Amino acid sequence: MTASSTPLFDTVLQQLGLDLAPWRGQGLSVRAPRDGAVYAQLASHTSAQAQALIEGAHAAFLQWRATPAPVRGELVRRLGQKLRQHKEALGLLVSLEAGKVRSEGLGEVQEMIDICDFAVGLSRQLHGLTIASERPGHRMMETWHPMGVVGVISAFNFPVAVWAWNAALALVCGNAVAWKPSEKTPLCAIACHHLLQQTLDEFAAEQGVAAPDGLATLLLGGREMGELLARSLRVPVVSATGSTRMGRAVAVDVAQRFGRSILELGGNNAMVVMPSADLELAARAITFAAVGTAGQRCTTLRRLIVHRDVAAPLLARLETIYASVRVGDPLADGVLVGPLVDRAAFEQMQNALAQAREQGGTVLGGTRECEALGEDAWYVRPTLVRMPTQSAVVQHETFAPILYVLTCASLDEAIALQNGVPQGLSSAIFTTDLREAERFLSSTGSDCGIANVNIGTSGAEIGGAFGGEKETGGGRESGSDAWKGYMRRATNTINYSDALPLAQGVRFDV
Ligand code: NAD
């Protein structure tokens, strides 16, 4: 017997101490993919309200940029603590509103905590370079400064972590944040906003540091709200996560006004399995990467490129797993595959499978399941599709648990197939041959932003820079030096001599 979503939403709000009354209105529905229940109607912001909120964020930035970075880090440290306290409730909310299994909902909140920790350390390390000057008595250096309001546009499938990746870094870097979450997950966004507002209040009271109103602002609405953010001259950086279609529009809107965009778009991720691979390990990695989150991660494994010598045993193993993997209520113990987000996602999946059949594919799975859980709940059996070639449907990202299987006869062929799609997010090879592994990671190997050996394509840690090439957009977020995307670089030259030598030996005597 599965519990209805409505009382669970009530409990989460109570645990978070969140009053929904000020947010109620028309425009957005809070819906639970697990049973299709609609919990609440929320108001979209009007464009006038959104403009005012962005102005408020800009005013907050003017104050925040002057707060020392380690003090800004203290705010983010407190946010991490707040998230630790509310991990259970927020994780459950992610499961309710995005349909993730319980462990993945909690994992997403853990990712928020991890990025806060990372950003705290960063707040003392936003350092530039000292560069040798060609002129005597001169010093050259690079300094990094905040940019202004960072606009964040996020997708439904990571309804809290993507905001945290951006907000934690943007805030320690001295920026304000204006967030336009997915219209499919507005309650997750309100919950995050609420926890950050509480943190800001406590920070101001206990730290004696002014935390300016509007430092973190939420813009609720549909695509038009994202467009407003992308076009606003008050928003120098727009970090946009979502489909390639969305990124194509945002990139143009931001470039038109010479803003900076950080684009995290669709993936079409592949794994190569070579004859020397540990096939049992590969099968487990494939299962998590391909069916986890019901195939609704940007890093979901969508293409398996298996060497013909090991195709038969690997596919036999996968067919057994695919037939038995538990699909169902994401809150139930032992369930690994929750629902698709909505009916449109189900229809897109069925459409892709029809195309795959037309293009010569053999489809296993893909049928609707668990209809008893709700008329508007869209569960599917994960799908293996053997394809004769990497045809049009395989080149396209369908946001569902479809794994296209292709065979290859050599590593060269495998790499050509892996790179032969428009997207370039994540990739992996399973091999125990050192030369194959190194080749895959080299400049003549995978062309993706993420390339792994003997692990799957999904489930990245926050310490590395995250993002991909080609139609994935080229942006980098999270770890490594991704923080530089949220700051501007200034080159400074200081003359401490009593002469005025010019660079390149130019003489200009007056
Ligand atoms: P989507 O593109 O439909 O929506 C994403 C966000 O963009 C939403 O907030 C939406 O309102 C907004 N938006 C849509 N059109 C816009 C426009 N023209 N201008 C401004 N904003 C606009 O994506 P989705 O269905 O929510 O998410 C699934 C997609 O996101 C998949 O393609 C997935 O690969 C991608 N994704 C990528 C990453 C990554 O890091 N690369 C991470 C998560 C999801």
Image: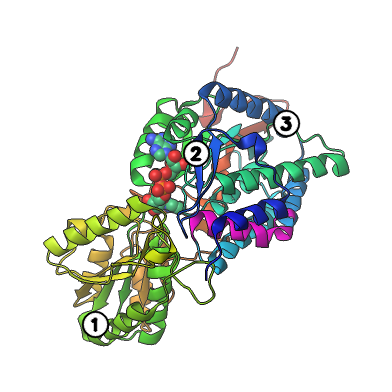
Q: Amino acid at mark 2?
A: Leu
SS class, disc 3? loop
Residue 311, disc? 1
**Residue 284 can be seen in this image:** yes
- Residue of label 2: 28
- Where residue 144 appears, as percent x and y from the top left, is 63, 39
Nearer to us in this view, 312 or 260: 312
Q: Is residue 189 above or below residue 308?
A: above
- Where residue 145 appears, as percent x and y from the top left, is 64, 36
Observer-side mark, 3 or 1, equals 3
- Residue of label 3: 213
Mark sitting earlier along the chain (3/1): 3
Count of numbered circles in the view: 3
SS class, disc 2? strand
Confirm if mark 1 falls within 8 A of ligand 1.
no
Nearer to us in this view, 135 or 53: 53
Nearer to us in this view, 134 or 161: 161
Mark sitting earlier along the chain (2/3): 2
